[in-house]
Image: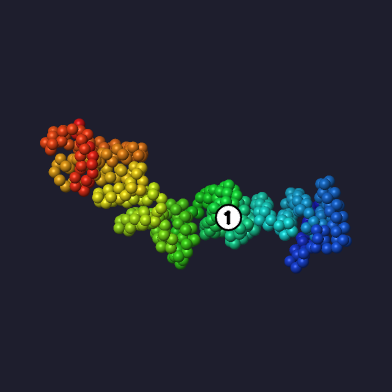
């Protein structure tokens, strides 16, 4: 009988609520306690009556007076909503009747209507929906629908809590196949973009950074971000809108994270973006991709453009070192040396550039007599020693090359025959090398 009473009260309440919600579109309650002194007296009386029963935990008696208070003066106090929420949670716990939850959800809408801060109450409503979704699975979709407009409209009012909750909703909807890969990817992309914008503006940086990290984690665990899903989804979109900068950046980021950088879609997206927004980083990516495709002339072109577009000397030096490495691998020793020298001009502490020059001198064929050919190993060792001094990670490679070079030094007797008698004496290596070094003999 008690449950039946709750049910009857709820049905009556819902009907009254619906009527008032409709009227509220065309009229606003005047004053905190209604439009007239009589309204005010009635509101104060009902407030006192329901509050008394409420304080005694007699919710069956309180709810009728509370309902009148809610209907007649909903702007009088936030206590109407705090106490109402607690009462209807109690009724739900006894009956598991979803109608009580619907009443709570409507209360949260009305609280936002009269007291503002809609994002907070939408989030709270969505949270309640998720809390009770074990008994009512359809509430996940309802929670999703409450929060999705914040993403679709890119609302400035979106909070970190809304973002996290909606990503969880999205994953739950995907698990139950109520949304599919495209919706998951799109929501993830929107949420990450919103978080990055908030962080860049300095708004609750810690909260939005935490939200971003959690959302990124959920997405990676979802299994959605695979090349098999991303490439067929975005290839037609990029083909249709090759000049959509936002789309291209999203696709590049997603493919980067999913390690799909060897795909044609990735190459086309980066190339399209580069045409629209030239940058050193984009040129570098295009150079690397052309290397992987064995398009060596294109790779060199993009490496040089990366150098021209870059303002950071250290990065310029790094790009030039990559060019030098590329040329060294293709036995273009003079070009490898020249690029590495340019790299050192931008960053004298670039150990890799020194290693490239030392390697080029040691590996290149030499024009001249046998003795002159051996002197190039002196200057090669100078650069190799400098490389390992600047970068300890290069030590093993440098030491291996140094040992090989030292085995090719001229002997003391060979030096004697050309008029060189002392180790440590200065010497200029001839030919295309044309650098000064010091004499050393093979041990």
Q: Vertically, is 198 above or below 383? A: below
Q: Vertically, is 368 above or below 4? A: above
Specify the farthest residue to the top.
443
Q: Which residue: 63% across, 57% down? A: 157
Query: Where residue 103 sits: x, y (%)?
Result: 74, 57
Residue situated in front as seen by the camera: 13 or 338? 338
Q: Which residue: 25% across, 41% down? A: 380
Specify the farthest residue to the front.
426
Q: Vertically, is 419 above or below 158? A: above
Mark 1: give few (<14), some (14-19) or many (20+) Cα within 10 Å: many
Q: Which residue: 56% across, 53% down? A: 201
Residue situated in front as seen by the camera: 130 or 404? 404
Answer left or right for 204 relative to 36.
left
Q: Which residue: 69% across, 56% down? A: 117
Query: Where residue 397 sits: x, y (%)?
Result: 31, 39
Specify the farthest residue to the bottom.
26
Which quarter of the figure is the C terminus placed in? top left
The image quarter containing residue 416 is top left
- Can residue 426 be seen at all in this image of the molecule? yes
Query: Where residue 418 sits: x, y (%)?
Result: 12, 38
Answer left or right for 23 relative to 144.
right
Residue under label 1, please give it.
170
Query: Where residue 200 sits: x, y (%)?
Result: 54, 53
- Can residue 215 be seen at all in this image of the molecule? no
Residue situated in front as seen by the camera: 199 or 435? 435
The image quarter containing residue 412 is top left
């Amino acid at each position: 009988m008690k449950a039946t009473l709750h049910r009857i009260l709820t049905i009556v309440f819902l009907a009254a609520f619906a009527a008032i919600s409709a009227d509220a579109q065309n009229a606003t309650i005047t004053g905190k306690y209604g439009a007239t002194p009589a309204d005010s007296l009635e509101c104060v009386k009902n407030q006192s009556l329901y509050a008394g029963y409420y304080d005694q935990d007699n919710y069956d008696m309180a709810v009728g007076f509370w309902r009148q208070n809610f209907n007649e003066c909903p702007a009088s106090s936030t206590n109407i909503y705090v106490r109402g929420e607690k009462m209807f949670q109690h009724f739900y716990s006894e009956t598991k009747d979803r109608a009580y939850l619907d009443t709570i959800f409507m209360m949260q809408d009305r609280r936002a209507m009269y007291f503002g801060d809609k994002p907070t109450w939408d989030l709270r409503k969505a949270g309640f929906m998720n809390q009770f979704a074990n008994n009512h699975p359809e509430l996940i979709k309802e929670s999703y629908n409450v929060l999705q407009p914040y993403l679709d409209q890119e609302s400035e009012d979106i909070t970190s809590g809304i973002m996290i909750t909606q990503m969880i909703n999205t994953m739950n909807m995907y698990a139950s196949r109520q949304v599919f890969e495209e919706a998951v990817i799109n929501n993830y992309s929107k949420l990450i973009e919103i978080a990055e914008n908030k962080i860049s503006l300095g708004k609750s940086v810690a909260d939005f950074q935490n939200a971003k990290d959690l959302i990124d984690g959920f997405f990676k665990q979802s299994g959605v971000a695979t090349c098999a899903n991303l490439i067929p989804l975005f290839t037609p979109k990029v083909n249709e809108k090759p000049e959509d900068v936002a789309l291209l950046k999203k696709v590049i980021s997603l493919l980067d994270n999913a390690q799909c950088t060897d795909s044609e879609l990735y190459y086309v997206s980066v190339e399209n973006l580069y045409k629209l927004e030239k940058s050193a980083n984009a040129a570098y990516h295009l150079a690397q991709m052309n290397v992987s495709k064995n398009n060596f002339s294109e790779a060199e072109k993009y490496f040089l453009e990366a150098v021209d577009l870059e303002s950071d000397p250290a990065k310029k030096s790094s790009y030039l070192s990559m060019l030098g490495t590329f040329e060294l691998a293709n036995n273009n020793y003079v070009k490898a040396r020249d690029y590495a020298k340019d790299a050192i001009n931008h960053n004298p502490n670039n150990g890799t550039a020194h290693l490239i020059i030392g390697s080029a001198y040691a590996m290149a064929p030499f024009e001249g007599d046998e003795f002159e050919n051996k002197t190039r190993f002196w200057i090669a060792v100078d650069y190799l020693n400098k490389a390992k001094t600047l970068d300890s990670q290069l030590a093993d490679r440098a030491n291996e090359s140094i040992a090989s070079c030292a085995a090719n030094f001229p002997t003391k007797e060979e030096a004697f025959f050309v008029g060189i008698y002392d180790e440590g004496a200065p010497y200029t290596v001839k030919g295309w090398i044309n650098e000064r070094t010091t004499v050393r003999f093979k041990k």
